[in-house]
Image (tube, helix red, strand yellow):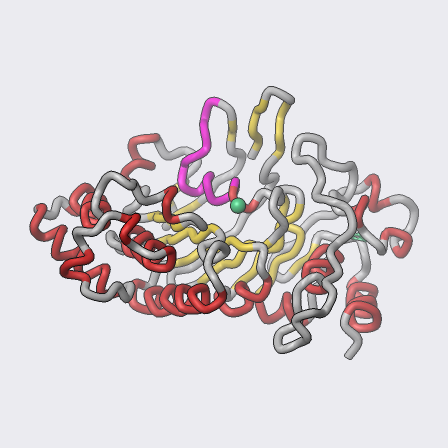
Amino acid sequence: MRFSTEDGIVKAVDGLSFDVERGKTLGIVGESGSGKSVTNLTVLGLHNPKTSTVEGEILLEGRDLVTASEKEMAKLRGNKVAMIFQDPLTALSPYYTVGRQIAEPYMKHTGASKKEARQRAIEMLTKVGIPQPQTRVDDYPHQFSGGMRQRAMIAMALVCDPDLLIADEPTTALDVTVQAQILDLLKDLQQEFGSAIIFITHDLGVISDMADDLLVMYSGRAVERGSVREVLREPKHPYTWGLLSSMPRLGGDTEQALNPIPGSPPSLLNPPSGCPFHPRCAFTDQVSGDRCATERPALGEGRAAACHLTAEQKQTIFFDTIQPR
Ligand code: SF4
Ligand code: MG
């Protein structure tokens, strides 16, 4: 997928493919600027077709979202595919009651009457744990706390029982206690609704709790893929090692200094040659010649990491130097 900007062509998400099944959660993790959010906008058809072109296909139940018309996409949005964001105020309008905003997509997609939709909104507010939903349904978003707005946005996203829910850093702005409650709520609702979830975050801790499968993104491309268990237990890409070592240890000393990955993510406009991670990678000298700088490593099928290190090197380096056992 490419975006045209005034500065040139930005390759945002290059050759990325993923699939996620109903009832399962795919975690997408990476630093900001790694192309995570662009990816989910594509799935929703919210990218601007005038400035970006999408290569490849994004299949939802066999239907290609890339070639779907704007009309088809409008039918899918909020119905088959829904989204929750970090900031509920981007999804909720300050001018309408919470109840109306939950009821509206329901009427639009199911043809329900106003009365039925209001009943459905109350039901949804109950499901997401809003107290006194019968009266709260007539409140405006500003009358809700931050955590309650997040719950209301989830209610709005799920009201039509979507097949796919995209959650983009949905708890980043919340304090730790509320964050845990919202994550629990999402897990419960996923059980009930059976939606597939794409969960986008920079927080590996959150992902270990939420996702079944994991895609690690760097510089607009997937660099590692596997089940969450596999990737967290034995990560195979130096960038994933960096993410892990910069994460506070669970139950560890909270004062513990973190080891951020040196350097910053590359410009998507002008990605480095070869392996996009090579300017920041500490292991390029373990690969023969200057392959890291010249040859782009491919991401294989299934459990895979896009890195020139041999399978044995990946294992030895991780267990000897990153996380000695
Ligand atoms: Fe590092 Fe080279 Fe592997 Fe890229 S291919 S992650 S630069 S060792
Ligand atoms: Mg983002």
Would residue 236 be visible to someone looking at this image? no
Measured from the top left, where is residue 266 in percent x and y?
A: 71, 39
Q: Residue at x 50, y 56 (%)?
A: 172
Q: Residue furthest top?
A: 6
Is 291 inside the magenta-drawn segment? no
Q: Residue at x 92, y 47 (%)?
A: 289
Measured from the top left, where is residue 140 in percent x and y?
A: 24, 48
On the image, which quarter does residue 196 sit in?
A: bottom left
Q: Is residue 290 above or below residue 152?
A: above
Write the start and end of the magenta stretch as one range: 38-50
Relative to 30, 62 lies left or right: left
Q: Is residue 223 above or below residue 51?
A: below
Relative to 123, 52 lies left or right: right
Between 122 and 234, the residue placed more toward the observer is 122
Q: Is residue 122 above or below residue 101?
A: below
Measured from the top left, where is residue 68 in percent x and y?
A: 37, 34
Q: Residue at x 7, y 50 (%)?
A: 115
Q: Quadrant of the C terminus?
A: bottom right
Relative to 216, 238 lies left or right: right
Q: Quadrant of the N terminus?
A: top right
